Image: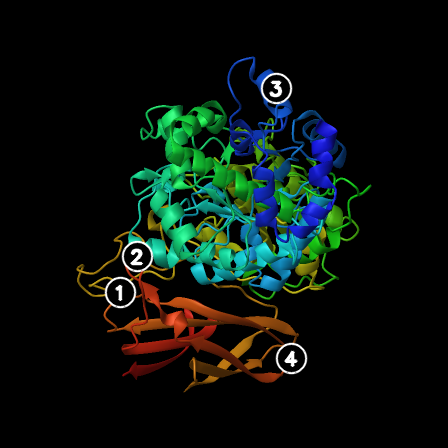
Amino acid sequence: MVSRLLAFFLIPTALLAQVKDAAERADSVLALMTLEELVGQTNQYNGFWNATGPMPEGNDWLEARVKALKNGLVGSVLNVSGADEVRALQKVVVEETRLGIPLIFGLDVIHGYRSLSPIPLAEASSWDPEAIEASARAAALEATADGINWTFAPMVDISRDPRWGRVMEGAGEDPYLGSRIAEARVRGFQGKDLADPSTLAACLKHFSGYGFPLAGRDYATTDFSAHTLYNWILPPFEAGVRAGAATVMTAFSAANGIPSTLDSVQLWGELRGRMGFDGVVVSDWGSIAETMAHGFAKNLRDAAKRSLAAGCDVDMESDAYLRYGLDLARSNRSDSLRFRESARRILELKFKLGLMDDPYLYCKQKSLPDVRPQAYEMAVKSSVLLKNKGILPLNSSLRVGLTGPFAADKNGVLGNWRVSARDQSAQSLAEATEASWLFAPSAPHSIGPEAFATELTLNSTDFSGNDRALKALRSQEVLVLAIGEHGYESGEGRSRASLRISLVQQDLVRKAFKTGKPIVLVVYAGRPMILEPWMQDGAAAILWAWQPGTMGGSAVADVLNGSREPYGRLPMTFVRSEGQIPLHYDAFSSGRPGPKTEVFWSHYTDESNAPAFPFGFGLSYTSFDYQNLRVQPSGTGWTATLTLSNTGTRAGSEVVQLYVSRQGNGQLYPTKALKGFQRVTLEPGEVRDVQLNLTREALQQRDGLGKSHSFERGTLGITLGPNSSEGLTWTTDLP
């Protein structure tokens, strides 16, 4: 019986040949399914060994899951990887269940699979959507070759709080930049056709507002205005939906008084209604069950009913739909229809992925492609030069000493979210420079295990290695210090109250400054961190390398020695102190801006309002001059043109950024809002006109009801510059 049914689904018969699209084919399968099998498609389980969230309690859960799998009551799994393992599990459901409906295999392919690119926040620093698309494409090529066909990425949450560990997984604080990157990552993962076995179904997450947790603590409640929702939080999701994202994931958090997984207004009204999303909505790990801990759902059955009604198609790791779905469907026609609709969307995705025609489509390659060149390129383009007193690029004749806890590190520099990457697999900076620089190990940053699910223990007592390192490097002319935070200090569940460099590293930097040698700080981090003023002042150069991934060693070395230029620009504002958080460039003006001589203006008494480094900031190995801004009306808006000159002695690239300001238009508007950018490469002495366009549509804002308004009146300001704090400004009064 099984073989006959399997043949019906998997072999292109005359009947199936007449069914032209995935939706119609899905309906043909639905007609043969029992109600229990329909519910089973909405159930997603972890793959029994690797876990990216809390595992079930008790001793009988594994047996129960295997039974559900063999009874056709599992529609998808996560954290199963490797073509052989995928094939083995797929074989169980194809050959042992009544209908042989294949599984979808999901995994957190966040910034690569086996070979890792820089963390997503670092990639956002490239301000290069084409490079980011290529990076996602490389990740898809590697992951699909190992059996994966669904990635839980990209994370498109806008966040203004660097204390939140998951800023490493997103694109920063700006909705325009975040939207362009969301589009790029969806295109990279999904390609032009999901049926191509080298593409992955993308997943926009976390819907919505997850990036605004109280006090920066992961999983905490969020509270934001409708204005913030429509103008900052939702635009990257809209962009991802327009780009064709196949799936969307709900947030763990409760937003504005309701857990996001149960929020029908957002899921039905905004996502499926206004945005027109017709794909699969999946919960985050256990988020349906967690609505009980929020105090919203009274029990798991209640949570399941509310989540289903809200429009969540797939239950990841809560067991809610499997335990109570059949009862809900039998007792309530509306719930039955909802399960049927969810199952239809899931089956449709399986058809689009080609799994219904060939369940083993993603298990046929014998080896993984080599995507390390792409990882290297992305690591180069992610680096941001924050300071340079002329020491960089390092002259090849200089005797360079290298130390710091991350100089020889091969693990922490990989960053978080590396489910399939092997520990200690990164190329270190010490390895990349061993032929030309002298390396000496310093005191370690952390001690003990380094693991995804446990806290990292920092070294707070033994600093003796710092003295030994500096003594060993006393004959060197320049010192490069590799400092920062470990990859397991950022990411999910890793929020920080302090963003300061650890004490053992501060000790190293202080003692290095006392040598009188030029000091180059290379900072490996998963978020914006705070460099003490004395560290910023004393350093001859500061290169923000982020967590650069597998090929970070050679990428960072090539930027430092000048064979490649520092390419990146900051996607988040860097604060001076934690008390400034949230600090973002696109804030509203208060009714009492300053500065003023009296105290009656919006400010701190013990800290500046200014950032340490503004959004969009980044230096090059050359210099650029901005002149002669002119703006002309066009049919769709305005065309802004300026003259850009390379006034330095090296070729280099500049990211010309377009910001808009408004006043007197009848609605609050940010002091500045990014609306365009363009990277321009110039030879020494080259002069070029750079043109950027601003559409009237880009000026629109949504009100508290989500209605779009253009507000084409008042004063319009257009600024072109190298970052959010500098530039040339043109203003006009709109009619």
Q: In this rendering, is residue 323 above or below 426?
A: above
Q: Which residue is mark 4?
A: 684
Q: How many residues crowd around disc 4 within 10 Å: few (fewer than 14), some, or many (20 or more)? A: some
What amino acid is labelled 3 in the image? Lys
Q: Real-space Cα distance between discs 3 and 1?
A: 57 Å
Q: Position of residue 643 (x, y in %)?
A: 52, 84
Q: Residue at x 59, y 79 (%)?
A: 646
Q: Are marks 2 and 4 in contact (CB under 8 Å)?
A: no
Q: In this rendering, is residue 25 above or below 243?
A: above
Q: Which residue is mark 1?
A: 668
Q: Position of residue 472 (x, y in %)?
A: 69, 42
Among the two numbered marks 3 and 1 on one chain, the one whose residue lies closer to the N terminus: 3
In the image, 344: left or right of 649? left
Q: Nearer the viewer, residue 211 or 292?
A: 292
Among the two numbered marks 2 and 4 on one chain, the one whose residue lies closer to the N terminus: 2
Q: Can residue 701 be seen? A: yes
